[in-house]
Image (spheres, rainbow, N blue to C red):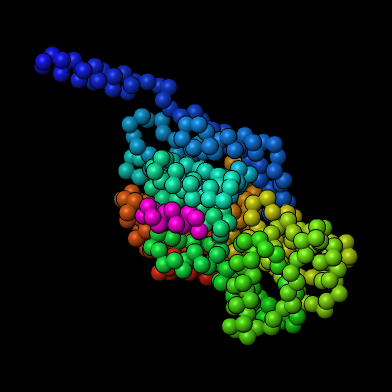
Amino acid sequence: MRRIIIFPALLFSCTIIIAGFRTDLTAPANNPIGLLAPPEGGTKPTPNHILFKSEINPPSGGQGGSAGRQAHVGVKPIRIGLLIQNSSSVEAKNGAEMAIAEANKNGGFNGRKFELVVKSMEGPWGTGSKQAVDMIFNDGVIAIVGSHDGRNAHLVEQATTKANVTFLSAWSGDPTLSQAFTPWFFNCVPNDNQQADILIQEMKRKKFGKGAIVADDDYDANSAFKSFVRRSAEVESAKPVTIKIDKSDRDMSETARIIGKMDTDCLILFTEPAVSDKIISELFKMKISLPVYGPLSLLCENSPLYSYTDVSANLLLLSSGEWYMRGKSEFAAGYHEKFGSYPGASAAYVFDAMMVMINAVKASGADRERIHKAMMETDYRGVTGTIKFDEKGNRISPVIRVE
């Protein structure tokens, strides 16, 4: 009987020793794909994005990105998840990879490297929740960063709250995300209320007497629109005339014609970026020149509004730091050197979000249950400015335009 017990034990030990010398267990290197456009121009999705999609959800567990992959079998990496809107969100992935690479260049944490797990939220309603759950229970991430719209952010918030996992939003400005009063949610982007306050201040500073708003039913744009209207009423600011888009106006020529007949000093667009692009284009054809403003969501990845220099400058009123200034930003220069293009807003905010999360992981001793407490102590000077959080997880640092 003793021989029967000992033999399997010896066989198991030999198996472990042999496995320890295998060199084919290292994950293959992943070549980064640079398909981004600088703030001056928007690059349209290309067929190469199909390659990127396959990288996000490979059959072997859904990891995307090469940053932080482990060459040493037996050393457990610290995995941080990144949820992106769709497979064309290359910019967000690139920003996260830069942060992970920087952390690993500095030694990781206690001999452990950081590893990025990326999943796309494409698919039917509810996919966002499923991807978050998969990350937590199948991929074993210690925390999650999100670069996606507010609708998906609510799904991720619900999943992470139930699992007691910290979630840091790096794009949605929906202020209702923090109204759930969960200790697991944080946002490194100024929320829609904060953005509205900045826009209202700008209207007063420029002494605009009359303004016009164009709004559609895009989730993020509609959230920003509601905040702007509510905040304007609270401070008794002048109420711009609102134009609700008629969906039959596909090329926005009729909307532009209505704007042209109005006596307005400025235009505020609460629409999806493609719609704003059509409106601005039609106004240009009509030789109508107006200062154009809108929420930060208009500067999403691949946004055509980057090609309008004056418009993008006005939208950057809502951001801070120097990430968009090629001559001053080390981040922009490093991004360009690595990916062959300059970063947009989503890359900058994801980079900062990932750096904040990495610092919190270190401060918590890589204890998943304590990360949210470490996040409350955040005081980080990032490429988008100083990041601190209030008791609800909102970013509280002032947004200052760098001239």
**Residue 280 occupies which quadrant of the picture?**
bottom right
Residue sitting nearer the eye, 39 or 217? 217
Residue 350 visible to the viewer: no
> From the viewer's perspective, is residue 181 above or below residue 67?
below
Q: Which residues are magenta?
A: 154-169
Query: Is residue 354 located in the magenta-colored stretch of the structure?
Result: no
> Residue 325, located in which quarter of the rendered image?
bottom right
Q: Is residue 32 left or right of residue 155?
A: right
Please tell me whether residue 220 is drawn above or below residue 42 in the rendered image: below
Q: Nearer the viewer, residue 250 or 333?
A: 250
Q: Main secondary structure of the magenta part?
A: helix
Residue found 41% across the figure and 30% down from its top: 71
Task: Please indicate whether residue 156 sits to the left or right of residue 225 in the image.
Answer: left
Q: Which part of the image, by quadrant, shows the N terminus?
A: top left
Residue sitting nearer the eye, 234 or 105: 234
Residue 227 in the image: x percent, y percent? Answer: 59, 72
Q: Quadrant of the C terminus?
A: bottom right
Residue 297: quarter of image? bottom right
Image point (49%, 45%), residue name: 131
Residue at the right extreme, as displayed: 286
Q: Position of residue 237 (x, y in %)?
A: 65, 83
Which residue is pictured at 64% across the width and 70% down the height?
225
User: Which residue occupies the foreground of this view, 200 or 10?
Assistant: 10
Direction from residue 273 to residue 3 in the image, left or right: left
Rendered position, 353 above or below 210 = above
Where residue 340 appears, as percent x and y from the top left, is 65, 42
